[in-house]
Amino acid sequence: MTAQKQKRVLLLKPRGFCAGVVRAVDIVKIALDTFGAPIYVRKEIVHNSYVVDDLRQKGAIFVNELDEVPEGKRVIYSAHGVSPAVRERAKERGLKVIDATCPLVTKVHVEAIKFAKQGYSLVLVGHRDHEEVEGTQGEAPDVTQVVSTVEEVDQLVVPDPERVAYLTQTTLSLDEAKYMIEALKKKFPKIVGPHAQDICYATENRQTAVKNVAHGADLVLVVGSRNSSNSNRLVEVSMNIGTTSYLIDSAKDIQPEWLEGRGRVAITAGASAPEVLVQEVVAYLQGKGYGDVDEVEVMPENVRFGLPPEIVQAIASAPGAQTVRA
Ligand code: SF4
């Protein structure tokens, strides 16, 4: 790397919002338009502080637990999903629920239920403090163990090593998941898993884009919040290739010294980071002499998810709701 290198921005595509995040954010906006503020949301609707602050200003109230929602009020579950215990608690409190769980998270819940019913012990590969993992584990808490490291795989004890199934969090690193699944297969040769991997298309595509571009870049900036699992994984993918990478919430987080001697700066964004923040980063870099901006499309991405029935019905029956964006 030399200071004479031509300064260039490589803007990765796909980046930023995935279909599950678009759907979840739309659900909150439509609920606010249709029913009026306040609308309660359990946990951050998606893991991005800009998105959460914007919805808060529009009238959403974010709570950690359902007990903070007044009885009978309307509450939205986040894109990361909830456990059956949470759904039960909502019923007890007479809450009107709108479920913004990403359909790809729901798919993993359905697999957990299926394997548990078939008598398997479940190993869930993921980060145990993540809401998605809490929700999935909650589908079969008595038979599910969460593992994050190969050491934890080594320590697993199950009633019948021949009846073990694994699932993964949707936003893991593809390489790390592969490594973990190999360790599980070594320990439990008869282990079974889902038909198709649980890591979602958006996580895979954004990691693949970084893998394709990071080796030719001097720096990779990932726009995303600290608590965004898939954003953190993008930084790891780049670092594993040997290219320095930083996770930034916005352009304000960029330290000027990161750019010293670095010509080609790649920019991507986690699945919950809005494009407006990416464009601010591009503008910041242009202000630092990075005049050329090349969008590098590694693969097309055209996934869309429909809205949940409770919101479709609400739109249909609300007066004047035809004007609301669906
Ligand atoms: S990152 Fe994947 S699982 Fe999570 S909301 Fe987006 S599409 Fe769904």
Image (tube, rainbow, N blue to C red):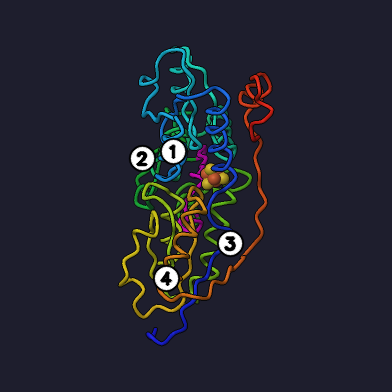
Secondary-structure class at tag 1: helix
**Residue 127: horizontal and vertical position, in percent?**
39, 44
Of the image marks 2 and 4, the number of the one nearer the N terminus: 2
Q: Which amino acid, mark 1?
A: Val
How many C-alpha atoms fall within 10 Å of the one at disc 2: few (<14), some, or many (≥20)? few
Q: Is residue 168 magenta?
A: yes
Secondary-structure class at tag 4: helix
Magenta range: 162-177
Q: Quadrant of residue 323?
A: top right
Q: Residue at x 44, y 30 (%)?
A: 60
Mark 4 against mark 3, which lies toward the viewer? 4
The quadrant of the image that shows the C terminus is: top right
Residue indicated by mark 2: 129
Asked whether 287 or 309 is in front, the reply is 287
Proximity of marks 2 and 1: CB atoms separated by less than 8 Å: yes
Q: Is residue 259 left or right of residue 162?
A: left
Q: Which amino acid, mark 4?
A: Gly
Q: Which amino acid, mark 3?
A: Lys
Q: Is mark 2 within 8 Å of ligand 1?
A: no
Q: Which amino acid, mark 2?
A: Asp
**Residue 2: horizontal and vertical position, in percent?**
38, 86
Of the image marks 4 and 3, the number of the one nearer the N terminus: 3
Residue indicated by mark 3: 13
Mark 2 against mark 4, which lies toward the viewer? 4
How many C-alpha atoms fall within 10 Å of the one at disc 1: few (<14), some, or many (≥20)? many
Q: Is residue 233 above or below residue 284?
A: above
Asked whether 312 or 149 is in front, the reply is 312
Residue indicated by mark 1: 133
Mark 1 against mark 3, which lies toward the viewer? 3
> What separation in Å lies between label 1 and label 4 (alpha carbons)?
41 Å
> What separation in Å lies between label 1 and label 3 (alpha carbons)?
28 Å
**Residue 309: horizontal and vertical position, in percent?**
65, 25
